[in-house]
Image: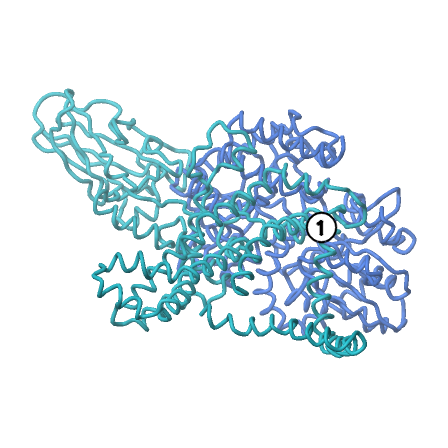
Amino acid sequence: MASASYEMEEARRMKQVRLASVLAAATAALLGIGACSSSTNATSSPGAIGGSVTLWGVWQGAEQQAFAAALQPFESETGITVDYTGKGNAIHTALQSAIQGGSPPDVSLLPDPGTVLTLAKQGTIKDLTGIVGNLSSNYGPAWNQLITSNGKLYGVWFRGANKNTIWYNPAEFAAAGITSPPTTWEQLIQDAGTIKAAGIPPFSLCTDIGWPVADFWQNTYLKTAGAAKYNALSTHDIKWTDPTVTTAFTTLRQVIGQPSLLYGGIQGSLSNDWPVCVDRVFPKPGAQPQAAMVFEGDYVVGEVKGNSVNYAPGTTASGGAACTADPSKTPCYNFFDFPAPAANSANSGAVQGAGDVAVLLKNTPQAEALIKYLAGPQGGAIWAHLGGFTSPNNKVPVTAYPDPVTQGDAKALVNATAFVYSLDDLVGTWEPDIFKAMLDFVRDPSDSSIASIEATLDQKATLATGH
Amino acid sequence: MARRTGSPLTFLSARPRRTRAVDGGNGLGRGWRIHLGSFAFLAPGLVWLLTIAVYPLVATIRNSFYDSTSTNYVGITNYRAVFSTASILVTFRNNVIWVLVFPFLVTFVGLGYAVLAERIRWSTAFKTVVFMPIVFSATASGLVWRTIFDLDPHVGIVNATIQTASSWVDPPGLYPIDTSAGQSVAALASTGVVAGPSDSLQTASTVQAGDVAELGLTGMRPAALQLAGAEKAVVPDPFLGSVSGLVWRDFSPSNPSAKGQVLADEDGIPGLRLSLIRSDGSIAGSTTTDKHGGFRFDRVGGGRFRVQIDARNFGSGFTGIFWLGTRSLTPTNGLNQTAQAILSVPLVDLSMIVAYLWIWAGFAMVVIGAGLAALDREVLEAARIDGASEWQMFRRVTMPMLSPVLVVVLMTMLISVLKIFDIILNMAPGSSQEDANTLALGMYNYGFTGLGDWGLASAIAVILLILVIPAMAFNLRRIRG
């Protein structure tokens, strides 16, 4: 969970920069979208109820304001006052204390499905199957699966994050003569070679405490072994010494094991904290890009936009101008889907991601109404329009997103043929060991090192799962 | 300083004695009434103490015997985990390094500053500057020092200084290739070029007078070419009696897969220093490429030659030491994970100690300086009259008289270092956090980030408490005595 909270929190901090400016226009946007989405969604109008509901989530600051805008129609339609508290990174600790102290909030948004299942097992959160009803079809089965226990649905997703994205600087790709981004892993490696031949380091590798490398590896595993094996690995039904694990390491080694493909080599990568690694590809005005692409989830956009509002989504800058490497002129940003090796093309539609899920702790009519509202598309559409937000809800119209890049990102998330949660977020308390192992892999990607990393991870998994 | 703090505490400790005397003289009844009265006055403080010190202490000790959510009793499992997990052993090791190095270092430096400050003219200004860092938050200091020690010499001033100094001895080339970052000169060879001796490049085949050599290089940074004023590559005409040719960027953005011929959108590589090498290895001539990448060695005479692109074109000079990295200063090869965790001394620890020294040296200086000022001048004068040298006076008179103050500084710093937290969180880059971790930070990480294992975090907290108690007791006893 640390990774989810780290990533989301960092992403949040970055997005605040952007949202602060966007929110100036929030009121105007609200009127427009509010009208538009209430016409598309008539099912979740529970009528006036009144009273109030307490709600906890992680969002604070500008994100909290955007979320408040998303809740506005609910409050005005039902007359229910939503008493929201943003708990930030401390949400797990805060909720645990509140449950023990006997005064939990009515509804809480959690950044990981692992906690949802733990709370479900404890019996502290309510079965939503009857309350949500047909609204559960607003999510792909893979999403609902993550928060279902013993056939009962325990949450509704509100926000999603897509980690199936590699972000590139279109100007740098153009300088290397690459006109269309790679669609297979092999093409990615080939393009990286071309970019290197053009004299540009292809990748800026994010390392930080290890979570970005873990995300990178997890994507590689998902694309080489598939979603079924991925989920089996997360529950330790596949051993960490399995050949599929080795394959993922050796595949990823084609990038991480090639220092000449990484900006700054291994040492430079190890000093690459989030979000500095993003700045190397999408620098602030006054600096030049030092690498062509960076892998991380769609929260990269918050950092890019924070570096300069000049960054335009897509491959043409505003007014049809050509993308420039110089961020003070007309820079651009774009992404391509994390590619699968040609031999594993069946896995190319699988997406690794994360999200925030709402759970019910007290059965009050107000809380149930809020759950139904969050399961509907109305709130998500408002926040989507404000930017910095993707919804896993397939009823949120693609047109709600402000630009083609975000639209593509959201489409990929909703249409994923398989959706898996970040593995490190699913394993529980030994998550830091995965981070450490991934940094060890960056430091030494040799066969013997991989073997010892696998043995260590398997030992930890055995300790944690008991099998 | 010590004397001044001593007096109010003596007064405090005198109070119970007086109460006892009253008690003994006037019987139980009145004693109890007095007690009740004092309890009434003590109650707010007592409640406060119970709530914020005693209860959390008891709860932490209890939790350390419970599982991650403090619901099930698990015995000493958490304590066993503390001593068997490599990543927690690392926190012990780091605390040991800090405790062994820092308090003595800061006392020593503080003493040096204090003695120095007594003897220089701008003493107040000097003291102000040295003392100033203590005013900044450790978080800000950590971030500043992280920048100071940054790997990139364009950012980190330490590496920038070394780079500047080393560039006098070993100046970098026009097209630096950073071999420490995985780049290699040999990888630049694209067309008609092969790796030569010691990081140089040579023509793949030999040439003779009247030939035109074409040397294609790949992986040349466009920014470096632009800076050198590169223009479109032009193949020079053959010249009688001379070896001519060009070195060009064998990469066409419009046709990235085309290699080997000079295309319209390819630039020459200017400023390259070339040598003409005879078959016996001696140098027949040297020249530099022009902005189109062209070159010519005139009047070369007979025989066959190789054109060499000298290694000095690609020298990267000093590219930075990863001060905040985890490279161990003690040899750890061949050790298992646990032994490594206990025995390695990562470079990042020492860098952080330097930063922490910068913060606390001023405090040590001020305390020791006050101690120096309070020294009995008569003793010093007596020593001087007896003919003691400066060093003898310092060693035999000043130091013994100053030792109580030095011990206070030492102990205060010891406690501060046992609890060290914020400088590590803010100064060590993500990839070094695990190796720079200390008990206090580990307690936070295990307890409050991610899922939160309260049991393990509580166990670490209890151990930390046990470690701090001797230092605390020692300090209290000194102050009281």
In what quadrant of the picture does the N terminus of chain B appear? bottom left
Q: Residues within 10 Å of mark 1 (few under 14, many from 20)?
A: many
Asked whether residue A125 appears in the rendered view, the answer is yes
Q: How is the image coloured?
A: by chain
Residue sitting at x 34%, y 43%: B265
Q: Secondary structure at mark 1?
A: helix
Residue A264 left/right relative to B193: right
Choose between A394 and B80: the one closer to the eye.
B80
Residue A6 lies, in percent from the top left, at 62, 52
Badge 1 amino acid: Trp
Task: Give the image quarter of residue B409.
Answer: bottom left
Kindly indicate which chain is depicted in cyan in the rendered structure.
Answer: B
Residue at mark 1: B454
- Give the farthest residue toward the front: B25
Residue A204 left/right relative to A437: left
Choose between A45 and A366: the one closer to the eye.
A366
Q: Chain of mark 1?
A: B
For the image, the number of numbered tags is 1
Q: Colour of chain A?
A: blue
Choose between A66 and B182: the one closer to the eye.
B182
